[in-house]
Structure formats: C-alpha cells, structure tokens
Amino acid sequence: MIGAELCELQTYLGAARHRALIWITGARDESHRLAAGLAAGFPPSTTGAVVSDISCAYSEITRLPSQTTQLLGRTLGWAVYDAFAGFNPNSFAQIAGTVAAGGWLILITPSKTDWISYDDPEYHKLRVEPWTAGMLTPRYLARLVRLLEGDRSVVRLGNGALALPNWVHADSAIEPVQTRPPFMSPDQERVAGVLTGSIAKRRCAYVLSADRGRGKSAAIGLALAAMACGRPLRVLITAPSKSALSAVFERIESATGALQWNGEFAQVGELEIVYLTPAEACQRLPSADLLVVDEAAAIATPLLKKLSGHYGRLIFATTQHGYEGNGRGFTLRFLDELKRLVPSVEELQMSTPVRWAEGDPLEQVVTRMLQLDAESEEPVVRGQIPLVVECLDRDRLVVDESLLRRLFGLLILAHYRTTPGDLRVMLDSPNLQIYVLRRGDELIGCALIAQEGPISEELARGVWEGHRRPTGHLLPQALIAHEGEICVAPWRGWRILRIAVHPAVQQQGMGSYLLRMIVEKAQDASVDYLGASFGATDALLGYWRRSGFLPVRVGDQEDPVSGCHSTLVLNPLSAQCRAWFSGMRARYAKRLRYRLNGTLSSLSIELLPSLFSELSLARLNNDDTSRLVGFARHKRSLESTLLEMDLLLLATVASWPDLGLASEDQALLVDRVWRQRDASEVKHPQGRNAQLERLRHLTARLLDALAD
C-alpha cells in the first residue's frame, strides 16, 4: 500500500515539475532499504547520489558530507542524505540544489527522539576542549525535529507508516512556462538580452540577483556567447571557486563549442576567457573588455570595489538566499559603493525557477530548515527607550523561531560569509555566548563570543612544541604556536566571532556601545583579555583600534577570496595581561617588520600604519640623524644608510597617513627599504635616479616631522 501511495506522489511531482522531501526515520539499514526502493522507482537512466559515510550498493555516486561540493553543477533525479553520517547544513543545502524537477530528496535519520540524543559526527567538529561531543546540548537537532514534525509538506516514513503531505491532492495541471530555446524562462531571455547590450556601452554595471535554480549563471553564459558573435571579446571572470562557474561555461559551450583551456585561459571562436580568483584578479588586473563576478555575495567588498574602479563594463551575479553568502547583505554593503564608482548601475532580478516549477515543496522546506531567507526587521526609533545589552539564553532560540530568524538575519546582513552552517554553530557550540543589543523589543545588534582558555600546561607545551592542535581556542593557540607566548595558556579570554548592527542604525555609535558593554561584562567576569580575528582592512583595523583592540599577529596566508591576511587583535583587561601586553606588542612589531620581505611580501602597504600603530618602535640618536641628513640633503648612497632608514621608517610608519604621504610614496619607502626590492621592480616613480631623488625628499620630510 505504501509503495502505491509513493508512486502516486512521484507521479504528481513529475506532472507538477516539483520536488519533495521524504523523511525516513528508524534503523539505519532499514531506512537505506526503503531509500533503495524509492530510487528503483526511477528510470534506469536516472542519476542519483547518496551522501553518507557508508557504501550504498543502490547508488553509483556516494559522497561524504564534506564532499558535496563535488556534486555542484550536476542534475540528479534523486538524492539521499544520511544524517547518521552527521547533519551538515551547508552540504544539505548543496545536495538539495542538485535534485531536478520530479525528484526526491530523502533524509535518513534515527527516530525522532533518538535523533535529538544521537552522537552526531558534526559534534566532533563543534566541540571545544574540555568539552566532549557527548557534553554538547543538541539545540540544532531539536529544532530540526520540531520543524519537520510540524511541516505538512514533508513526506514522513517510519515504523511502517506513511504520513502524506498536504500537496498530495493539489491540482497538478500546471501550465508549463513558454520559452524560446536556448532560454529556459522568459526571465532568463530578458536578462541575457540586457547583459548582451552591455558590450555597446563604455561604462556600465549590472547587478543580477536570484534565488538558486533561477538560471542566472546560465543567463550570463548565453549573454557572453552572444556578445562574442562576430567580434573579439576578452572576459575576466572571477568567483570564489572555478566550480561555481560550471553553468556559465556549459552555456557558452552549448552555443559556441568546447572551450579550449590552457591553465587560467580559455578560448572558443572570438571569445577569450581569463579565470582568476578574486584576490588574483585584484593583484594582476589583466586587460579585459568585460568583468564578470559570479557569487559576488561571497566576496569581500574591498576587492569588489577595487575591481569596479578598474574595469569599464561590469556584471555582478549573486544568489539571493544561498550557502555561499547572502545577496541581501551584499546589496546593502556594496550597491551604494558601486553607484559612486559607476554612473549607470542597473539591478536585475530573476524570480522564475527553471529547474523546477513555482511553489516547489522541497525549496520551501529547505529554506525553512536552514533559515536561507532569514531577515532582520528594520528598527524604528521610538522616543527615549533605553538601549539594553543582555546575554541571550540559547535554549530560547530552539522554540522561538521568530527571534532566531531576526538574529540570524542580522548576522547575514552584517557579514558576507554567513552560511547555513553558522546557524548550527550559533546554537550548538559549547563555548559560545550571544549578546544582543535591543531597544524595547527591537533587535538593534548582536555579538557572538567564544570563551577561550585556559589551556592546561601539558597541552600548552604540546602546542608550543608544534605537535598538538586542540579543537578551538584560536587566540591562545595562535599566540602560543606562532608567537611563542606560552604565558597566555592559564588566562581566560573571550573571542568576538561576529559583531553586527542593523544597517538602518549604523554610523550612530551603536556598534561601539555594544563593544564597550561587552568589555564591561568581560571585566565583571574576570576575563584576562578580549580578542578578535578577521581579514585585515584599514577600516576594520581602525574600528577595533578605537575600541582598544590592537594587532598582535598577522597571518602568513592571503585569503584567495577576500585578498586579506587574517589578523588577531587583543584588548588586555587583567593586570597580568596588561603587564605582558606592551612587551608582546614590541615583539610582534619586530616579527612583522622582518616578515615583510618574506611571507608578508604581498601584504597591502596601506595597512602598515594601522598594524604598527600605538607602538614606540625606534628612537634616532644623533649619529643616526646625521647619516640620514647626509642621505637626504647630500649625496650619501641609499645602501650606506639602510640601517638608519629602517629606524626612520619604524619611528614614523604609524603617522604616515597624518603626514599626508601618498600611497605611491609609502610603497616606495617600503619596497626599497624594507622589502629590499630592486629599482626595476618598483613602478612609481620609474627609474633608479627618479626613485633615489624621491627617497631623499621623503627622508627629509620624515626627519622634519620627527623634529616638530
């Protein structure tokens, strides 16, 4: 009987061009047997996939939850997500997006009560010493069970019983959307036409937003193929990963033939494509007739701004509610910046699904489960209602979906890399606190704080020696492992993971007020230090510095998407931490200075004044000054004065912006003195003699500043 009813449901899905979620609960082996029966109901040519950590004979494709990115760009008739292998929200969202119209996404879990208490493998990623996985509170899974039990669009199968969904008796006679090949929707045809016209303009920008499954990447591919018809076209295309562009490349190839790739270059006919990561694109800025940025919401605003200022024709595409980043937050953060750079900015929306029909049950339930459409309500100023900062009880978020939605929506607006997985971190991480800033019932801002330290003496020694890496405790681990500061091990720290204020009330001191209140609460709790880790920009370093947080480490690696180096900042609170801090900062500055010619050779020079700020790094004695005067006002060589120039740069670097030194002059000083680059490697000014004269002038100017 159950088999017949499931066949009827599948027939409905095919006719309606919909997809649905089947939730199978119970013993793992039996659940996979039921899933195999469902998969067998599809034609033999149908491709399916299983996400699990065990082998499944009924599927040729099996991936671990950590490997679902390998399936992006594929179209599956059905998919199984085995939550016995762990429920990872990001991978669940990814596999859901691959299921085609008429298909099932099958979720296999323990029984409802057992799932909440199940030792989910994801807990081993979330736990932080000294917590064990079994000590974590299962808030996220409790919330999922509550949502799935109450969602009538979900097909529920367990203990031999089938619960039919509310759409089973709906009218399946849905009129198909009329399209003209090669387009899959009128939306796609309209957008591709608009984008194709961009090549006739000298300066323009388009911002294309759509939910997943609307065919926006395909529209870009079709437009590029049309632009290159009968004329040469060179396109720079960037995205967080090359795999995210598979739909763009597929549509180009369907219209023009196979792309011939040679490393980062591809060509077919008159169309030439250059693919670079966002950071590489900003560094190299290759010539191009057009710049295309896909999944722009997952890319840092400073990089997008730099690219926008360099290229004349711009296309930005972003998923409105996705696991790569959120398009709504992207629009708020970047659109105003773009309009200041480009006089003609056109926003394009695509709403019609192309891979399934409107009202798709699977899309709706996945959106609810993962809060993909979470938005925070705009605060309304009401008289003199006081601001309140309080620590939120996370158990409340499990049952208060409205509050959770507003809170997560606020984080999405504030940070370009907020993903569905962050929701599970927010609910389940054992060392996490959530502070909210509210006025009455209105949510104004929030901060996520991880409690870190103390670390046992034995563990700290293992970290210092380089053979232990415990889960969590990012700040003390970084200080011990990379900076050798083992004395921090017994101290208690709070790391601010995220801090957010609603865009409608930003630039009013709300974020600084929230941070001050957190400092007070940390002091009341006898915390030794507060800290944060983020991709360094001059604006962010300035924000944290104004609140008493100063840099203590700059990471070696440049993020390929943001182009930024990870930076740790600390605010010492206890007496013992403050006594240590000044000496530690001096050691940090020396390491930073020497790494500029090595692992930090690509570090942006505009960051140096902030990274060296509030440090007394060098004092010039009379001999030093005399030699520098000999270089600045006479004919002493640069090589004979390098040691004194090093001292001069250390003594003045923090004040370069206040002295009005142009960015080209700062680059000249750093490249020739600190990075020891040859004159031929420095662009401005060109030529050894011109650089030498400019260096003499700058040296005199810096000496005058020190004398004032």
Image (cartoon, grey):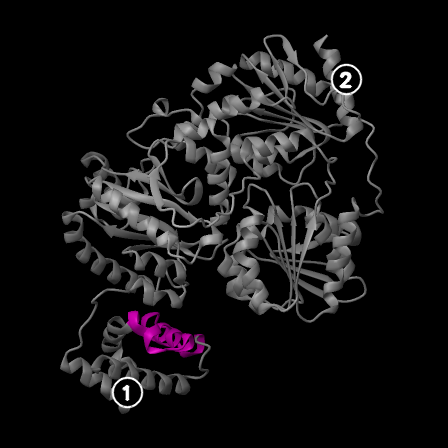
Q: CA distance from mark 2 to mark 1?
A: 87 Å
Q: Main secondary structure of the magenta part?
A: helix
Say what amino acid the circle numbered 2 marks. Answer: Glu
Question: Mark 2 touching mark 1, by CB under 8 A?
Answer: no
Q: Position of residue 426 (x, y in %)?
A: 42, 35
Q: Quarter of the image holding residue 307?
A: bottom right
Q: Which secondary structure, mark 2?
A: helix
- The numbered mark, 2 or 1, whose residue comes first in the sequence reads 2
**Residue 221: mark:** none
The residue at 53%/50% (across/down) is: 329
**Left or right placement of residue 19 versus residue 333 in this view:** right
Magenta highlight on residue 671:
yes
Read off the residue under disc 1.
Answer: 632
Which residues are the magenta region?
A: 653-681
Q: Position of residue 123 (x, y in %)?
A: 41, 28
Q: Position of residue 392 (x, y in %)?
A: 37, 35
Q: Quadrant of the N terminus?
A: top right
Read off the residue under disc 2.
Answer: 8
